[in-house]
């Protein structure tokens, strides 16, 4: 039996999970509602939540995880739409948004859209099949998804809540044409002043850490745009990754994380902000603020079956993410394209190396705008 790993500071990776069948990578369900676009596919959730009082054990076996399909660079199997690219430009073989050009560091082409849709499946699996954890006290009427990307979260939420209208906003018009009647999209920059006529019952943002130059102002705008009793929920990933041993700092993957932090700081983005979300929400006036912690292993190194599955999916996601993140190295650090590509080859080897025991801490933070009461009206 392996000795337990020492906990890493404030939060370390937990592993109290029931046994799960690893005979195959989780497959999408065979039945789908007819109205769901082909890019929207859901994975079955795991059966329990997370505990945070135990450390994860490393799988010391020599098996390369062939039981769950192996581990390699992801091959796209879902073709995203390419009909709405009026606002994008070509850069180093990838396409980027033209509206507010340069604000977002990732491409918006088909490869990136496929990655975002797959990442949505990973979140769905991580959150036990829930799109949101905020405990709404009423059926939502108006919902806003900021930084909606391909719109897959907004579409799924609209399908699950047919009486709500869901609005998704993004810098890139890459959302599908075929959407539920209660879902719409707009090209907008959520770091500008918000001018929505209606108030929202839920405002959702996911993986926005690289998009926020002034994060606290974003929380202030969201607070002002909520109806009393409405919730804001942020689902995000702490950056950089961590490890409970020295396997990450000594790797090229560890160097990649350090370079990304430095490059983005030079471009006006601090990727280390996620742990501050709860405090900022409380400071701007949210009440009943809660934070739930989850984990994504970087590959299939964990012994726990469910974490191994999450690691498989996140490893695929990270491989594609690294491929798309050339702009920070070139714009922020002054590297050439050839230098970036050569370094990324080494980094991807570490992503697939089960001796690198890296993981990300995920934080889901939600809070409520106070209800209007007689006391607040008379104050």
Image: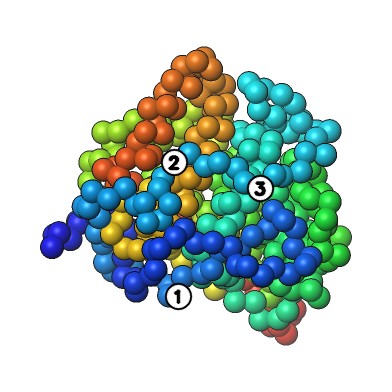
Q: Nearer the viewer, residue 332 or 36?
A: 36
Q: Nearer the viewer, residue 4 or 192?
A: 4
x%, y% of residue 168? 75, 55
Task: Give the CA separation, mark 2 to mark 1.
Answer: 27 Å
Task: Give the CA separation, mark 2 to mark 3.
Answer: 17 Å
Q: Nearer the viewer, residue 194 or 21?
A: 21
Q: Quadrant of the N terminus?
A: bottom left
Q: Mark 1: which secondary structure?
A: loop
Tell me what residue is drawn at x 82 percent, y 39 percent.
83
**Quadrant of the rendered image containing residue 48:** bottom left
Residue behind mark 2:
72
Apparent side of residue 197 relative to residue 209 in the rendered image (left or right): right
Whether residue 265 is visible? no
Q: Quadrant of the C terminus?
A: bottom right
Residue behind mark 1:
47
Disc marking residue 196: none
Label 3 near label 2: C-beta < 8 Å? no
Q: Residue furthest bottom?
A: 374
Task: Give the CA separation, mark 3 to mark 1.
Answer: 27 Å
x%, y% of residue 250? 26, 33
* Labels 2 and 1: the sequence-earlier one: 1
* Labels 3 and 1: the sequence-earlier one: 1
Label 1 near label 3: C-beta < 8 Å? no
Tell me what residue is drawn at x 20 percent, y 56 percent.
6
Disc marking residue 78: 3
x%, y% of residue 102? 67, 29
Number of callouts: 3
* Labels 2 and 3: the sequence-earlier one: 2
């Amino acid at each position: 039996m392996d000795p337990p790993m020492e906990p890493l500071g404030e939060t370390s990776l937990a592993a109290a999970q029931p046994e799960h069948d690893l005979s195959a990578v989780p497959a999408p369900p065979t039945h789908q509602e007819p109205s769901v676009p082909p890019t929207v596919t859901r994975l079955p959730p795991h059966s329990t939540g997370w505990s945070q009082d135990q450390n994860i054990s490393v799988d010391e076996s020599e098996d390369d995880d062939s039981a769950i399909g192996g581990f390699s660079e992801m091959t796209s199997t879902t073709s995203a739409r390419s009909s709405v690219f009026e606002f994008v430009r070509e850069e180093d073989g990838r396409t980027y948004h033209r509206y507010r050009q340069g604000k977002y560091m990732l491409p918006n082409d088909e490869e990136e859209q496929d990655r975002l849709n797959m990442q949505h499946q990973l979140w769905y699996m991580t959150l036990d099949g829930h799109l949101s954890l905020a405990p709404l006290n009423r059926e939502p009427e108006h919902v806003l998804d900021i930084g909606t990307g391909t719109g897959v979260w907004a579409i799924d939420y609209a399908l699950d809540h047919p009486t709500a209208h869901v609005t998704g906003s993004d810098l890139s018009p890459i959302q599908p044409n075929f959407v539920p009647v209660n879902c719409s999209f707009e090209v907008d920059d959520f770091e500008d002043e918000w001018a929505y006529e209606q108030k929202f019952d839920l405002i959702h943002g996911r993986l926005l850490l690289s998009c926020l130059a002034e994060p606290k102002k974003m929380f202030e705008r969201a607070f002002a745009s909520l109806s009393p009793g409405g919730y804001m929920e942020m689902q995000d990933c702490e950056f950089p990754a961590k490890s409970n041993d020295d396997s990450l700092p000594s790797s090229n993957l560890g160097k990649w994380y350090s370079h990304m932090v430095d490059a983005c700081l030079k471009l006006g983005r601090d990727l280390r902000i996620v742990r501050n979300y709860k405090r900022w929400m409380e400071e701007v006036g949210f009440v009943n603020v809660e934070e739930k912690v989850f984990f994504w292993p970087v590959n299939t190194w964990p012994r726990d079956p469910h974490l191994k599955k999450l690691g498989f999916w996140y490893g695929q996601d990270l491989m594609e993410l690294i491929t798309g993140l050339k702009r920070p190295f070139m714009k922020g650090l002054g590297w050439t394209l050839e230098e970036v590509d050569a370094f990324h080859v080494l980094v991807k080897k570490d992503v697939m190396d089960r001796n690198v025991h890296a993981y990300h801490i995920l934080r889901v933070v939600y809070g409520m705008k106070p209800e209007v009461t007689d006391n607040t009206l008379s104050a």
